[in-house]
Amino acid sequence: MSADVERLAREVETLQREIETLRGEKRRLEQQNASLASLYVAAYRLHGTIDRPEVVAIIQEIVINVVGCEETGLFEVAPDGASLELIASFGLPPGVLERVPLGAGVIGSSVRNGALWLAGDEPRPTGADETHLSACVPLVLAGRVIGAIAVFRLLPHKAALTREDHELFELLGTHAATALYCTGLHARAAELGHARGA
Amino acid sequence: MPKKILLVDDANTVLMMERMMLRGAGYDVVTARNGEEAVQMALAERPDLILLDVIMPRMDGFEACRQIRANEVTKAIPIIMVTTRSEATNVQTGFDAGANEYLTKPFNSVELLGRLRTYLPE
């Protein structure tokens, strides 16, 4: 009898360990699922409209709510090709970074190099306006940088950017670029349509 | 019968993500875009739980929470406030309005699903 009880006790222990392992695996899969859902939703939302103000709003919505920041700026390369223009911002003081020469500071360098910049990378921010910069995501379309998303101060309860945020930045780098570019094509097509109709 | 959750947020991106996450976890999901709609949907749908954003147009989450708590039909529905603001004053205002919990965005999906299971055991 006691041998049976011991055997059953060991089996219970084994099963409890398996349950814990499965719980851990379930949590990992839930997290992975959520991360994939974020990427899917971001892409879906970006390509769900060709209205420029909506695309701009969606980019900001993603950065503010999904990454979790309280200051962000969206830049486009100016027609002269020599600078960046701030086309939308959230939480930034008025007049800050309205025009950034290509190559200047972290944002200008990131755009000129076409390389994602994360806090801790070189070059380090030296200008006062870039003090709280957490990430700069160049927007790249067919090998050409057309703009950038700058993420400044993160939300107070968000300690640092995560691996999931980096994956989202990779997605934004191409899909936000394409979405913005398409809004321009749509606007020009509409203008041509009006001109022909006039 | 799957448990029903009312998601309330003015950001479509957030609604879509939460909806995917919760449907993937087996919940039935209905949505509202502001506090006024949230109060109406709570009455109409009688959800098992409400995830309620704070900063919204027309009626914020605090007022929506107060109104849901003031209605005999909906007063017992668990409400988790979800927001980007974590300041102590906001948290206290949420609890004073009748919220059961307060979660900050961006939230960890494992944490969120764990909290849901507390109120909606499987």
Image (tube, coloured by chain):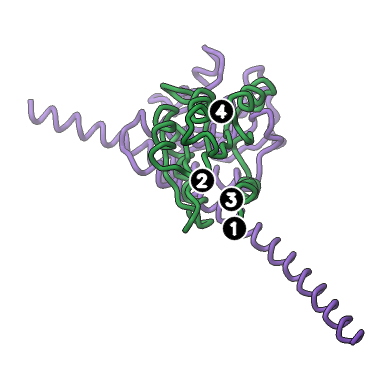
Chain colours: A purple, B green
Q: Is residue A91 above or below residue A13?
A: above
Q: Which residue is mark 3?
A: B120
Mark toward the viewer: 3 or 4: 3
Q: Is residue B94 left or right of residue A57?
A: right
The residue at the point 55 percent across, 20 percent down is A91
**Disc 1 to disc 2, C-alpha distance:** 13 Å
Q: Which residue is mark 1?
A: B122
Q: Are the residues under marks 1 and 3 on the same chain?
A: yes
Amino acid type, mark 1? Glu
Badge 4 is on which residue?
A: A108
> Which residue is under mark 2?
B48
Q: Nearer the viewer, mark 4 or mark 1?
A: 1
Q: Residue A4 at what x, y percent from top left? A: 86, 86
**Subunit under mark 1:** B
Q: Residue at x 92, y 84 (%)?
A: A2
Which residue corresponds to the image point at 51% horizontal and 47% vertical from the top-left? A38
What's the amino acid at mark 3?
Leu
Q: Are marks 2 and 3 in contact (CB under 8 Å)?
A: yes
Q: Amino acid at mark 4?
A: Gly
Q: How busy is the neighbourhood of tag 3: few (under 14 within 10 Å), some, or many (20 plus)?
A: some
**Are labels 4 and 2 on one chain?**
no
